[in-house]
């Protein structure tokens, strides 16, 4: 049976299971970093953060929601450092094994920290210049996604950047083929195509923003099949 791309799929990804094998998880996070590099997955985040930075800014505090393996947080850190910006980045994830992996991967990088935490449990006293979320929002069900956007906006001083997948048949069949050809990791082979089916279209983001009572989003499509969604304060 062919997938229905008109609506988001509800199945949870294997990576979201609480008892996921830590070796498989580490292998999947390794491969996700390779996919991000190969498909220019960092560009929507960098572009969004650049747009929110005030002219002449030399410091930045950033919360990275659903930080995963920490590769994107480190890419933002390095991008900022190359421009003379001192970035203090906190990556959070609900998965303790994922945070342990990120700490190992980014060990020794100054001002880059990781914490096991649920976004919705963070007190609003913990504010950040920018709150960023890459490839994590599609893991939420609709109501939870609305709550997550509201919370990210409340925690931010300058605004929110979301970098996530575009639910599109070409994206689905392409990643399905690529992972079958090049990956032996069970999580990647199952979760990468499923992530596309759980992902968003422009109208989805516009609806979520209305339901979260946020300002009108600036939405831009990036190759390969990514959305950059910006909420400015």
Image: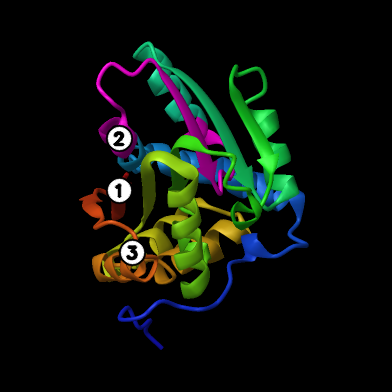
Instruction: Give the structural element (helix, strand or loop) at label 1.
Output: strand
Quickly name the residue at label 2.
52
Quickly name the residue at label 3.
209
Q: Is residue 223 found left or right of 183 in the rendered image?
A: left
Q: CA distance from mark 1 to mark 2?
A: 8 Å
Say if 1 sits above or below 162 in the image: below
Going by the picture, which residue comes out furthest to the front? 125
Q: Are marks 1 and 2 in contact (CB under 8 Å)?
A: yes
Q: Residue at x 40, y 76 (%)?
A: 8
Q: How busy is the neighbourhood of tag 2: few (under 14 within 10 Å), some, or many (20 plus)?
A: some
Quickly name the residue at label 1.
230
- Expressed as whole percent of the image width and height from the top left, the position of residue 29 reads 59, 45
Residue 57 in magenta stretch:
yes
Going by the picture, which residue comes out furthest to the top? 84
Q: Residue at x 47, y 50 (%)?
A: 154
Instruction: Give the structural element (helix, strand or loop) at label 3.
Output: helix
Q: Is residue 141 visible?
A: no
Q: Residue at x 40, y 20 (%)?
A: 80
Q: Residue at x 31, y 49 (%)?
A: 231
Q: Is residue 202 found left or right of 152 in the rendered image?
A: left
Is 85 or 100 nearer to us in this picture?
A: 85
Say if 21 sits above or below 128 in the image: below
Q: How busy is the neighbourhood of tag 1: few (under 14 within 10 Å), some, or many (20 plus)?
A: many
Residue 183 in magenta stretch:
no
- Expressed as whole percent of the image width and height from the top left, the position of residue 67 reads 56, 43
- Expressed as whole percent of the image width and height from the top left, the position of residue 63 reads 52, 38
Q: Earlier in the sequence, mark 1 or mark 3?
A: 3
Is 68 or 186 nearer to us in this picture?
A: 68
Q: Are marks 1 and 3 in contact (CB under 8 Å)?
A: no
Disc number at residue 169? none
Q: Which range is magenta?
A: 48-73
């Amino acid at each position: 049976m062919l997938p229905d791309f008109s609506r988001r799929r509800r199945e949870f990804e294997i990576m979201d299971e609480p008892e996921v094998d830590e070796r498989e998880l580490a292998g999947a996070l390794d491969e996700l970093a390779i996919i991000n590099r190969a498909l220019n997955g960092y560009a929507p985040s960098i572009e969004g953060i650049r747009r929110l930075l005030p002219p002449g800014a030399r410091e930045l505090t950033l919360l990275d929601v659903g930080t995963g393996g920490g590769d994107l947080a480190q890419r933002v850190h390095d991008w900022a450092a190359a421009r003379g910006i001192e970035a203090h980045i906190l990556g959070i994830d609900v998965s303790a094994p994922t945070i342990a992996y990120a700490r190992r991967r980014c060990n020794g990088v100054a001002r880059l920290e990781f914490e096991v935490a649920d976004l919705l449990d963070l007190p609003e006293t913990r504010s950040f210049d920018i709150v960023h979320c890459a490839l994590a929002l599609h893991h939420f069900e609709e109501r939870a996604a609305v709550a997550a956007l509201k919370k990210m906006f409340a925690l931010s001083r300058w605004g929110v950047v979301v970098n996530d997948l575009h639910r599109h048949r070409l994206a689905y069949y392409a990643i399905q083929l690529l992972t079958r050809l090049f990956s032996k990791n069970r999580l990647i082979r199952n979760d990468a195509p499923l992530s596309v089916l759980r992902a968003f279209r422009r109208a989805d983001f516009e609806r979520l923003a209305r339901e979260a009572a946020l300002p009108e989003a600036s939405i831009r499509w990036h190759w390969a099949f990514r959305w950059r969604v910006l909420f400015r304060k």
